[in-house]
Amino acid sequence: MSNSTHTAATDQHSSAESGAESTDLAAGNLQERLMASGHERPEEDRCTICFDLIEFPVPEHSATNVCCMKKVCNGCILEARWRGMLDSCPFCRTKVPDNDESSLAMMQKRADKKDAEAIYQLGNAYRQGHFGMVKDVPRAIEMWTEAAELGSLDAHYMLGRRYYTGDGVEEDKPRGIHHWQQAAMKGHVLSRHSLGCVEFVNGNYVLALQHFMISAKMGHERTLNHIKVMFKEGDATKEQYAEALLGYRDAAEEMKSPQ
């Protein structure tokens, strides 16, 4: 082998090693950022009237009206009804539409103004066939993608589910995980829980527990139950389970509606 050929081969090998080290470093940095951020729920999880964090599951304990796309907790909705606001939005006072056509028009108006929540909800409508729309999962994914680009954490979560499982789109687990990571670092609890489940299934119990500890302390009961199982199986210590339980109780207390 000539000196030039040997030098080229050595340079190529060094380049490959350098590339691998850079990839490992980037992955390590991402894990550090994942574990260091997203320990508090986003402002979008608060009621826009009383500003309390909404209980899980959020859709069962709140409503998002199509007029303004603001989340209002069930407690504040009940309070508004007691005050006689039976057919108007508790937040913006707009009359609530009484048919699918009007509801869709209001939502589309918000979406045209690049309201991330409206675009996300339109995606849900396409997926479920709501408001008289024909089910169209590919279109739903397009809407969620746009909403995610505009900052919707729920859209990132939905895209994560679709790509990870291949539901309605070609399976792409790394892409699904990426969406969950983006949302988890900003406090999205279901995305954090999903990352924990991925690590658990892959046998990475230490990482799984770290994710689960974060989401449990934000008040997610299903995550707490996962930690309990890990404790019983010897994959989490008694101290870790106790820490998660106390954190969960504190978060659950904070989410209790005063109404």
Image (tube, rainbow, N blue to C red):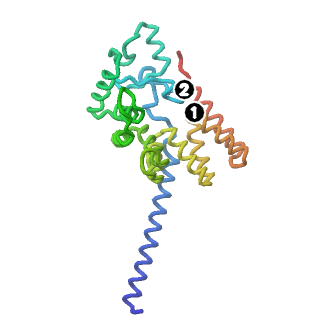
Residue 96's disc number: none
Relative to 23, residue 211 above or below: above
User: Total marks drawn?
Assistant: 2
Mark 2: few/some/many CA within 10 Å (<14, 14-19, 20+) = some
Mark 1: few/some/many CA within 10 Å (<14, 14-19, 20+) = many
* Residue 203 as seen in the image, left or right of residue 120: right
Q: Residue at x 51, y 52 (%)?
A: 32
Secondary structure at badge 1 equals loop
- Disc 2 residue type (three-letter): Met
Q: Quadrant of the N terminus?
A: bottom left
Q: Residue at x 48, y 14 (%)?
A: 78
Task: From the viewer's side, name the closer residue of 127 and 217.
Answer: 127
| Dot 1 and dot 2 residues touching (CB under 8 Å) | yes
Residue where numbered disc 2 is placed: 255
* Residue 188 as seen in the image, left or right of residue 92: right
- Disc 1 residue type (three-letter): Gly
Q: Position of residue 179 (x, y in %)?
A: 44, 46
Taking the view exactly as shown, the residue that stands out farthest to the front is 134
Q: Position of residue 109 (x, y in %)?
A: 27, 28
Instruction: Name the image quarter holding residue 241.
Output: top right
Instruction: Name the image quarter holding residue 23.
Output: bottom left
Q: Position of residue 75 (x, y in %)?
A: 50, 17
Q: CA distance from mark 1 to mark 2?
A: 8 Å
Secondary structure at badge 2 equals loop
Task: From the viewer's side, name the closer residue of 122 and 151.
Answer: 122
Taking the view exactly as shown, the residue that stands out farthest to the bottom is 2
Mark 1 or mark 2: whose residue is earlier in sequence: 1
Residue where numbered disc 1 is placed: 219
Q: Residue at x 44, y 71 (%)?
A: 18
